Image (cartoon, helix red, strand yellow):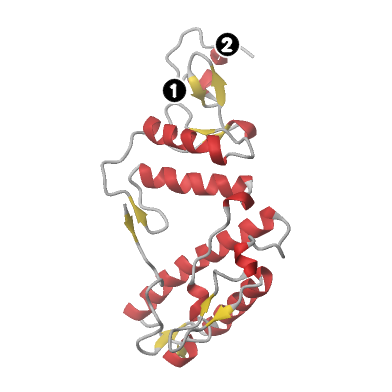
Amino acid sequence: MSYEVFFDFAQGLAAPLKVPTGTKKRLLEHVLEIEGLLALKRSKYEDNPVHWDHFDENYKKGFPNVTDDDALCNAIQGHNEWVVRTYREFGEWSEKPVAEGEIITPDEAQEFWHGFQRLTVPLNRWSANYYRNRMEHLYEVMRGRPNEGNDFDEKPLTVRQAAQVINLFSEYLDTGDLRLDVPNGYDYLASSTDGGYDWCEKCGPVHPDAWTEERGCGKRKCPLKQPR
């Protein structure tokens, strides 16, 4: 497995960066918002850069100030997506500076650089939607499609192999009972609880339209193909 590190080992800008006007304000606002929502504390050891302290009581106790699991997962998922998106933008702007904009100096970047730290949701706080998002991420990677900086170095798993791995994880993580699986003939995760597929004891996971499309089911007497 290959991992793209994004900002993980970067301590700041090496040179001034020209960015679209308002970028610095937008970055600062996001960092302050996520700090306030999650009660993240800034730490600094000697001459090392400022960082969010993963060892403070708030973090170790699973962000108790955010009592709603959905709100916590949405905040952290959105933040991590923001980190990846900003990393891509910085790369684009460094290669091709914007025609008109503002300059972010290395000193100014230190005001928000610690905010490029990706965060983790404790397992006991995973919402059903967050579980689905994480499993969709893993499925894409196992199928040989790089996702969120992860790349499967081995031969991609087949659709059914990847689906079975997700099924193994579900025993421990699927507290929302989503029952994620891949409908026969397709290549994406779906949930039976929202109509993403129908389960048949003869055919396995079948797309809801299979009984009309006759896709993904080889059984002539499949109950899902019978008139409804």
User: Taking 201 as reference, is 40 left or right?
Assistant: right
Q: Which mark is residue 190?
A: none
SS for tag 1?
loop
Q: Which residue is mark 1?
A: 216
Residue 212 position within the rendered picture, expressed as x and y whole percent measured from the top left: 53, 19
Q: In the rendered view of the protein, which quadrant contains the C terminus?
A: top right
Q: Amino acid at mark 1?
A: Gly
Most distant residue in the top direction:
221
- Give the class, few, some or many, for how many residues have Cα within 10 Å of label 2's Cα (few <14, many ≥20): few
Identify which residue is drawn at 33% across, 45% down.
144
Q: Quadrant of residue 97?
A: bottom left
Q: Position of residue 6 (x, y in %)?
A: 39, 68
Work out whether residue 73 can be spotted.
yes
Does residue 184 sit above or below 228 in this rendering?
Answer: below
> Dot 2 lies on which element?
loop
Residue 105 showing in the rendered view: no
Residue at numbered disc 2: 226
Badge 2 amino acid: Gln
**Position of residue 107 in the picture relative to residue 36 (left or right):** left
Identify which residue, 210 or 180, lies in the foreground. 180
Q: Position of residue 188 (x, y in %)?
A: 46, 38
The answer to whether 187 is drawn above or below residue 35 in the figure is above
Instruction: Please tell me which residue lies in front, 64 or 11.
Output: 64
Q: Residue at x 35, y 63 (%)?
A: 4
Percent of width and height locating residue 33: 65, 74
**How many other residues sit within 10 Å of disc 1, few (<14), some (14-19) or many (≥20)?**
some
Give me the C-alpha separation between circle 2 and circle 1.
15 Å
